[in-house]
């Protein structure tokens, strides 16, 4: 981590971010619009590169309306075959760079039948069904404790703030519980039914590892999902990654304005 932080500090003139954002599908453009320094993951010591279509792999630093922000333009996923602790390494680096608030965004499928494609959902809590945990292994006491509390991973104050920002912008916003699977296959109708019975509202293949590590490091976390598709059990339609990208692009204007409003008010 020392090597990584030293490298980043040299490249960014010691830029000190207070807000970290992980940009999910469709939101990547945000980091093109606000970019003071950009470093490709490939260049950064100990980072892994992103391989999914529609994702760039850059760490982008920008002052946005007076707030110093670091953004991950593209994230690594567990289903790519990386070790679960490797994909959360950038969150630990954000903490070391001085980040206090971490905003996690993603594309997710609807589990709640009242959700529609292009809806935004504030994550109130999550269910980790990835079958593993990014904190497995020796504990680094400089980051957090061995058995971290998980009673308020997604900060109530940030949930309220995001809701207020949406209201101010006239954006209808959903709230709900995000269920994480490893992927990369999407869910069967029976799996969607099971998740609904167990209390989930949306399903995806990211975010939860980053939230677990961010919470462990003491970061204040906000999570927002862009709902890209109906649940397979209710729509009966086939689902492709292209459909997910198209739907995420449809929502991107409102998603970007919401993120900007949140940055201004955090
Ligand atoms: N399932 C899992 N991950 C997803 C989905 C989905 O339906 N949509 C976007 N990411």
Image (spheres, helix red, strand yellow):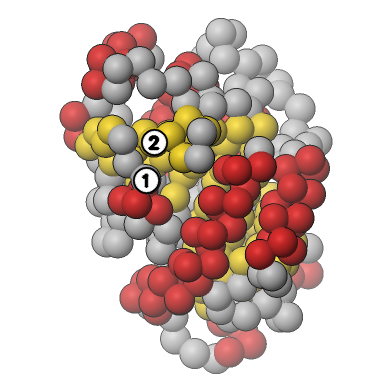
**For the view shown, which residue lies furthest in the bottom direction?**
236
Label 2 and label 1: CA atoms lie apart by 6 Å
**In this picture, is 69 found above or below 109?**
above
Q: Does the CB distance between marks 2 and 1 fall below 8 Å? A: yes
Q: Earlier in the sequence, mark 2 or mark 1?
A: 1
Q: Quadrant of the C terminus?
A: top right
Determine if residue 133 is in view. Answer: no
- Percent from the top left, x then y, of residue 122? 68, 57
Residue shown at 66%/69% (left/top)? 171
Q: Residues within 10 Å of mark 1 (few under 14, many from 20)?
A: some
- Percent from the top left, x then y, of residue 34? 37, 45
User: Between 27 and 204, which is closer to the camera in this rendering?
Assistant: 27
- Percent from the top left, x then y, of residue 33? 34, 51
Q: Ligand 1: does it lie within 8 Å of the C-beta at label 1?
A: no
Residue shown at 46%/44% (left/top)? 22
- Percent from the top left, x then y, of residue 133? 56, 36
User: Between 167 and 98, which is closer to the camera in this rendering?
Assistant: 167
Residue identifier under label 2: 62
Determine if residue 35 is in view. Answer: yes
State the count of labels: 2
Secondary structure at badge 1 equals: loop
Residue identifier under label 1: 34
Q: Residues within 10 Å of mark 2 (few under 14, many from 20)?
A: many
User: Between 118 and 29, which is closer to the camera in this rendering?
Assistant: 29
Q: Is 69 positioned to the left or the right of 45 in the image?
A: right
Residue shown at 66%/42% (left/top)? 265
Q: Is 125 positioned to the left or the right of 247 in the image?
A: right
Q: Which label belongs to residue 172?
A: none
Q: Quadrant of the N terminus?
A: top left
Residue shown at 62%/16% (left/top)? 144
């Amino acid at each position: 981590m020392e090597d990584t932080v030293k490298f980043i500090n040299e490249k960014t003139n010691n830029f000190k971010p207070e807000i970290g954002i992980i940009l999910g599908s469709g939101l990547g453009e945000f980091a093109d619009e606000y970019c003071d320094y950009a470093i490709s993951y490939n260049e950064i010591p100990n980072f892994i590169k992103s391989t999914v279509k529609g994702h760039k792999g850059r760490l982008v630093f920008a002052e946005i309306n007076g707030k110093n922000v670091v953004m991950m333009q593209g994230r690594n996923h567990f289903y790519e075959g990386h070790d679960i602790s490797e994909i959360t390494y950038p969150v630990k680096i954000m903490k070391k760079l001085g980040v206090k608030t971490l905003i996690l965004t993603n594309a997710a499928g609807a589990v709640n039948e009242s959700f529609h494609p292009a809806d935004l959902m504030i994550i109130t809590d999550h269910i980790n069904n990835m079958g593993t945990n990014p904190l497995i292994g020796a504990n680094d006491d400089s980051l957090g404790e061995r058995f971290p509390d998980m009673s308020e991973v997604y900060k109530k104050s940030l949930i309220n703030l995001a809701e207020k920002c949406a209201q101010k912008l006239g954006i209808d916003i959903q709230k709900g519980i995000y269920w994480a699977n490893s992927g990369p296959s999407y869910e069967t109708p029976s799996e969607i039914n099971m998740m609904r019975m167990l209390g989930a509202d949306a399903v995806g293949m990211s975010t939860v590892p980053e939230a677990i590590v961010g919470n462990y490091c003491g970061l204040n976390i906000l999570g927002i999902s862009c709902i890209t598709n109906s649940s397979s059990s209710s729509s009966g339609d086939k689902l492709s990654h292209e459909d997910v990208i198209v739907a995420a692009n449809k929502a991107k204007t409102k998603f970007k304005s919401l993120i900007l409003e949140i940055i201004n008010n955090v």
